[in-house]
Amino acid sequence: MNWSAINYDWNQVRAFLATAEEGSFSAAARVLGQTQPTVGRQVAALERSLGVTLFERVGKSLNLTGSGADLLVHVREMADVANRISITATGQSKTIEGLVRITASDVMAAYQLPPILKQIRLIAPRLEIDVVAANDLQDIQRREADIAIRHVRPTQPNLIAKLVAEATAHFYAAPSYLDQVGRPKTEAELAKLDFVGFGDVGTMIGFLNPAGIPVTTRNFRIGSKVGIVSWELVRQGLGVSVMSDDVAAMTPGVEKVLPDRVPFKFPIWLATHSELHTARRIRLVFDVLAEQLTRHTRDAQNHP
């Protein structure tokens, strides 16, 4: 090993990686919990120690130079190794205390997780739980979360994934809205109503049309990319949308539309890193989540 050639500081490397991935010193400072001048100084120090220019400023943007792009490939490999070291160390923990970070959609985080977290708190009161409410897929391998709850099977290598339930969903609306427009008896009548958009409207149409609901963009006059906002719009009478029966059972003021229609079905997967699963605190949370999500889903499907 040529130790004299390793003459840079890992904090400088982290600052470079965060700046390259976030696009600016200020954005890098936010994710690193530092100040913008500090990040700038760390990147400048790395440039001096390596004798290369890593970024060039174009207007208000920072662009990687050729040297910066070459270095970024190796720095990402270093970051992956650092994450694996952290994961391995965490996996050796045998105490039921410390932080466990769970990521789930904002709707699940707001409605389905709280009663489960109460159970976890009773079992392990010294645990710290951080809920990352995100509708995009958080990367467990990069430690954005310890446990992920997803509706698609994770495909990344080195992950443990468990199918804990097959949930159901129906159309729902506020009784006040249905009193105004009438309660549809067929899918064709349903397609004449207003729909509340959850996220991308094109994706929703692509989901509903093959299911026999001939909606178009004209049906979607209001919506939000934030799921809990869209669900509140439904609850307050602005239209119809699909929602899991579990969430609907916990929401006063909504009514099932076309109640005899065959429900939509979607999986609930739990995922964690294979090494993290050996950590006692993460294994505990994983197992309780699996048990409770299975039970809650079953209860919701039996709800009248």
Image (spheres, rainbow, N blue to C red):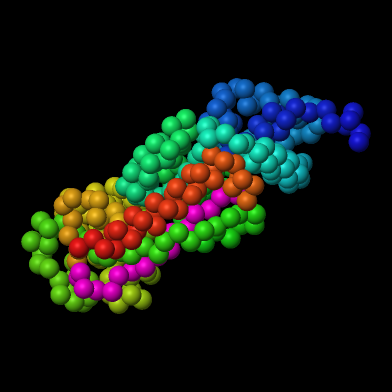
Instruction: Residue 268: say if magenta.
Output: yes
Q: Please provide percent x and percent y for residue 153.
A: 52, 61
Q: In the image, what residue occupies the spot 64% across and 57% down?
A: 157
Confirm whether residue 240 shows in the render.
Answer: no
- Going by the image, does 177 lie left or right of 209? left
- Going by the image, does 187 lie left or right of 293? left
Magenta stretch mostly in which secondary structure? strand
Q: In the image, what residue occupies the spot 12% across and 68% down?
A: 183
Tell me if residue 238 comes above or below residue 183 in the rendering: above
Q: Please provide percent x and percent y for residue 167.
A: 36, 62
Tell me if residue 89 comes above or below residue 193 in the rendering: above
View extreme (right): residue: 2
Q: Quadrant of the C terminus?
A: bottom left
View extreme (front): residue: 123
* Magenta stretch, residue numbers: 258-273
Q: Please provide percent x and percent y for residue 98.
A: 53, 32
- Going by the image, does 179 lie left or right of 88? left
